[in-house]
């Protein structure tokens, strides 16, 4: 178990030519990928490298991982103090040792399951059963969840990409409340060429502080305005995608706000996509004694509010299980048409069943899971205290969560 203490502080330098966005405007000025792309440059690049238009588009404007490779190859650790602390990625390494030990104990190659095509690319039955049981016990779903409601993908980015491909046509749009996790830009845009419309709260009645971003009526007004603007722009909005708990703000939406999301989607014929990948990373903070607890959208009574075939929940191993490298996520949906559409492209994103069964073993071992979550939450509390104390000592403003 690793607690990050004693990391040297470095001055934050603003380079000449880089605009500094005022604190009051940073939400409405968040950059959305795909909004500034030069057609002439794309055509020139396509000709130079013998690429398709979309290939040149990706090379010029949408490759976020290539430039990161160098820094990611030299991460900071207690034994590499000159390495890079990568703040742009959300990785929880606090329980890596425990996860590593568990996996080593559980690895058991079953040739029939792991060295063949097994049951195919939709996901191992073992993981889907374990996931259904985990969700039933931990997320309190109103609708029964079985293996036929769960689709396995190699990470949550792949889950979002596949789901957007299934419900949107090229040029359609997805609404996402601001500030948004910047990875959504990639997940929504890169393959399906679907627009991200950031739901802005600037100027919305009732909005004055970040706390107001969780208010049900403020959200209703902001989303209705965003939908109206999308129609004026000729954009067809197909879904509302929310991160719950919120990324990057780190708080949970109250049930009343989640119900507003569902209500708006029901009224306008939109899909509601709830990204709940941080569901089990919520920990107590004495500074916020009345913090809203996590309640999954699966547990809400949405009968008559939104058709259950338009409500989808996403989850993955990366955050709650400190295992970004396993590259495992899943889509939970009651829409069998979507399951079939996802199945049609699943061969292109097929997670090895031996990797899937590693996560299944974690979900099946409830005693280990309880101990793991308790220890993880304790370490998160401790590290949160270290980070926020550092910010306060150095006069760095932050949004507590």
Image (spheres, grey):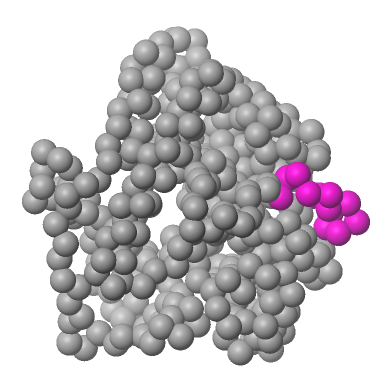
Q: Residue at x 32, y 40 (%)?
A: 93
Q: Residue at x 54, y 74 (%)?
A: 210
Q: Residue at x 35, y 33 (%)?
A: 95
**Position of residue 233 in the picture relative to residue 9 (left or right):** right
Q: Is residue 46 visible?
A: no
**Position of residue 77 in the picture relative to residue 131 (left or right):** left
- What is the x, y in percent for residue 357? 49, 22
- What is the x, y in percent for residue 59? 31, 66
Figure quadrant of residue 396? bottom left
- What is the x, y in percent for residue 303? 88, 51
Q: Is residue 25 visible?
A: yes
Q: Relative to 303, does residue 336 appear above or below in the rendering?
A: above
Of the pair 395 and 248, the residue shown nearer to us: 395
* Total count of labels: 0
| Magenta stretch bounds | 297-309
- Magenta stretch: dominant secondary structure: loop
Residue 122 on the magenta span: no
Of the pair 389 and 187, the residue shown nearer to us: 389
Q: Relative to 7, does residue 264 appear above or below in the rendering?
A: below
**Position of residue 360 in the picture relative to residue 129 (left or right):** left
Q: Relative to 281, does residue 288 appear above or below in the rendering?
A: below
Q: Residue at x 57, y 30 (%)?
A: 123
Quadrant where the N terminus is found in the figure = top left
Of the pair 119 and 87, the residue shown nearer to us: 87
**Position of residue 225 in the picture relative to residue 359 (left or right):** right
């Amino acid at each position: 178990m690793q607690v990050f203490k004693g990391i040297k502080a470095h001055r934050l330098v603003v380079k000449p030519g880089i605009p500094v966005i005022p604190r009051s405007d940073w939400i409405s000025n968040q950059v959305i990928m795909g909004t500034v792309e030069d057609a002439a440059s794309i055509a020139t690049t396509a000709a130079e490298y013998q690429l398709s238009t979309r290939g040149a588009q990706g090379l010029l404007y949408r490759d976020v991982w290539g430039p990161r490779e160098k820094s990611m190859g030299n991460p900071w650790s207690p034994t590499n103090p000159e390495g890079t602390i990568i703040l742009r990625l959300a990785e929880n390494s606090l329980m890596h040792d425990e996860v590593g030990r568990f996996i080593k104990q559980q690895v058991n190659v079953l040739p029939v399951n792991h060295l063949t095509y097994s049951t195919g690319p939709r996901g191992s039955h073992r993981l889907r059963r374990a996931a259904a049981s985990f969700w039933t016990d931990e997320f309190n779903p109103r609708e029964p969840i079985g293996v036929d409601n769960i689709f396995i993908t190699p990470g949550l980015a792949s889950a979002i990409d596949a789901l957007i491909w299934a419900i949107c046509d090229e040029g359609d749009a997805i609404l996402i409340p601001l500030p948004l996790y910047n990875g959504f830009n990639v997940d929504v845009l890169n393959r399906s060429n679907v627009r991200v419309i950031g739901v802005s709260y600037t100027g919305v009645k009732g909005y004055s502080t970040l706390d107001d971003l969780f208010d049900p009526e403020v959200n209703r007004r902001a989303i209705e305005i965003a939908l109206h603007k999308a129609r004026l722009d000729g954009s067809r909005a197909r879904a509302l995608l929310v991160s719950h708990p919120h990324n990057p703000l780190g708080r949970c939406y109250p049930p009343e706000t989640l119900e507003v999301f569902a209500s708006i989607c029901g009224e306008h014929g939109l899909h509601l996509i709830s990204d709940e990948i941080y569901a089990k990373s919520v920990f107590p903070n004495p500074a916020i004694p009345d913090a809203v607890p996590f309640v999954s959208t699966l547990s809400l009574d949405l009968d008559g509010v939104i058709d259950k075939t338009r409500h989808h929940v996403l989850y993955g191993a990366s955050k709650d299980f400190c295992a970004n490298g396993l590259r495992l996520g899943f889509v939970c949906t009651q829409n069998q048409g979507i399951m079939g559409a996802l199945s049609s492209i699943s061969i292109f994103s097929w997670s090895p069943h031996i990797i899937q069964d590693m996560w299944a073993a974690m979900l099946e071992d409830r005693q280990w899971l309880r101990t793991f979550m308790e220890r993880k939450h304790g370490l998160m509390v401790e590290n949160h205290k270290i980070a926020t104390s550092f910010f306060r000592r150095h006069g760095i403003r932050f949004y507590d969560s």
